[in-house]
Image (tube, rainbow, N blue to C red):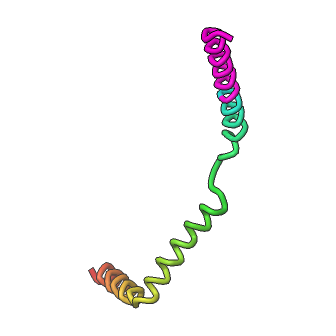
């Protein structure tokens, strides 16, 4: 087998493999492209976890009572003024 024939066969094989991979990847992308349509359960769970941590921090540090006290003072000032 001459060098030109070997080169030609290897180039043809590479082109066919590249074409197959492009086709396979594009089919996989099309198949799964429409499946991601919104929030997943894990994303909702993450949001809920963040909210619980924030509420826990407010309750644990005692800052909740301070916030409540300041809101009551502001409401009293609005009523009085």
Q: Nearer the viewer, residue 81 or 40?
A: 40
Quarter of the rendering occupied by the N terminus: top right
Question: As displayed, is residue 40 above or below residue 46?
Answer: above
Question: As displayed, is residue 81 above or below residue 65?
Answer: above
> Picture coordinates of residue 60 (x, y %)?
45, 89
> Picture coordinates of residue 58 (x, y %)?
43, 83
> Picture coordinates of residue 3 (x, y %)?
61, 11
Q: Which residue is drawn at 31% across and 78% down?
A: 78
Question: As displayed, is residue 34 above or below residue 56?
Answer: above
The kind of secondary structure the magenta stretch mainly shows is helix
Q: Quadrant of residue 43?
A: bottom right
Magenta stretch holds residue 11: yes
> Over which residues does the magenta segment extend?
1-21
**Left or right: 74 as drawn, with respect to 19:** left
Q: Quadrant of residue 69?
A: bottom left
Q: Which residue is drawn at 56% across and 73% down?
A: 49
């Amino acid at each position: 087998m001459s060098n030109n024939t070997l080169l030609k066969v290897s180039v043809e094989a590479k082109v066919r493999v590249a074409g197959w991979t492009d086709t396979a990847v594009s089919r996989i992308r099309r198949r799964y492209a429409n499946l991601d349509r919104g929030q997943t359960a894990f994303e909702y769970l993450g949001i809920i976890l963040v909210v619980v941590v924030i509420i826990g921090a407010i309750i644990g540090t005692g800052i909740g009572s301070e916030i409540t006290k300041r809101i009551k003072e502001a409401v009293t000032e609005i009523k009085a003024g």
